[in-house]
Image: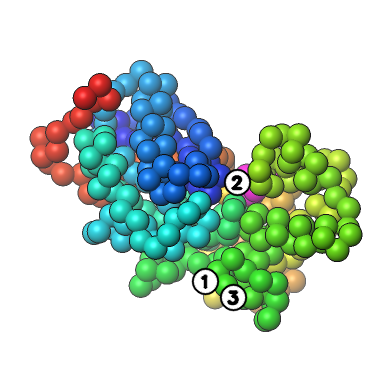
Amino acid sequence: MLRAGVDLGGTKIQSVIVDPAGEVLGQNRIPTPQDHGSAGVITAMVSSVHAALADANAGLSDVLGVGVGAPGQIDHEAGTVSHAGNLPDWLGTVAVAGPMREALGVPIELANDVQVGVMAESRLGAGRPYSSMLGIFCGTGVGGGIVINDALWLGRGAAGEVGHMVVMPDGAPCPCGRRGCLEAYAGRSAMEQEARRRVDRGKHTKLFTIMQKKGRTRLSSGVWAKALDKGDHMANDLIDRAVWALGLASASAVNLLDVEAVVIGGGLGCRLGTPFADRIRAAMIPHLILPEKAPQVLSAALGDLGGAMGAALRVEHTVPPPGEIGVVTEED
């Protein structure tokens, strides 16, 4: 049987269909709707699953279940997502599993988006050679995950929140409402806010011109990469600042956990690739208690598909016995 995975982000929805070996047979990527609230986002996820199935020449009758990786706090039993501040108009606690199960007729398993991405890298990607790793995913925000002895460490529910490690007391404002978090320096949303503040103070940048030419409404990873290619001073300065913060945070985490590898993923991390990971490692080493045993710092190998592939892996956890839930076709 096949499994579907959905990676829900602030700017895009990525869906995949994978076989039992984890090979991607079909995929679909669409922008996250920005103007129809949580109901519009759920409808878009359902449509994306259908499109990925069509790409795989498969139907819902071939699917064991759908895993959804979402930002925010996940309540597995209730099937809800809360505190997803990077999603448009996502107010309070939103039921996700129920409406998607009703629309698709197959089991739905919710999980944190970064945690499933980290597990995918651990099992199928850059982390495969290592039994312990730290994943740091830089996208709209900054999330993380910890793998110890090949298993995801969840703690009491908030383990791996590297994005909210403080790298500068009373520092830059973070979208979480606090100050000085890693996300305030290395999350795209916070970086864009800082770029806008600098422009308001009379500084010059090509970032927003590139954004408009690309037809974007936000500074996507592609916009940042293009600005860096053009030698934009502000883009370089803000990326330098992000590297500094990522090096400091990863060093603190490594000093505590002593993991074998750090994997840098997320939209921005994947777009900037190995050179970005190498710079983070160089920024990390001076802060390590054992620099001679510095871990590998690697760019995520699964790219933009990693989150959706990891979400598909979650299906194995809650699939009911065959026949318990009937399949509803799109025509129904």
- Mark 1 or 2, which is nearer the eye? 2
Give the extent of the magenta segment: 267-272
The quadrant the C terminus occupies is top left
**Which mark sits nearer the N-terminus, 1 or 2?**
1
Eyeballing the image, is 121 above or below 146? above
Q: Amino acid at mark 1?
A: Leu
Eyeballing the image, is 286 above or below 9? below
- Between 217 and 107, the residue placed more toward the observer is 217
Give the residue number, with chain letter if any, for mark 1: 257
In magenta segment, residue 120: no
Give the residue number, with chain letter if any, for mark 2: 267
The overriding secondary structure of the stretch rendered in magenta is helix
Give the residue number, with chain letter if any, for mark 3: 178
Figure quadrant of residue 54 = top left
- The reply, left or right, for residue 232 in relation to residue 106 is right
Separation of marks 2 and 3 at Cα, in angstroms = 23 Å
Residue depicted at x 35% and y 61%:
93
Q: Amino acid at mark 3?
A: Arg
Q: Position of residue 291 (x, y in %)?
A: 69, 70
- Mark 2 or 3, which is nearer the eye? 3
Residue depicted at x 44% and y 68%:
159
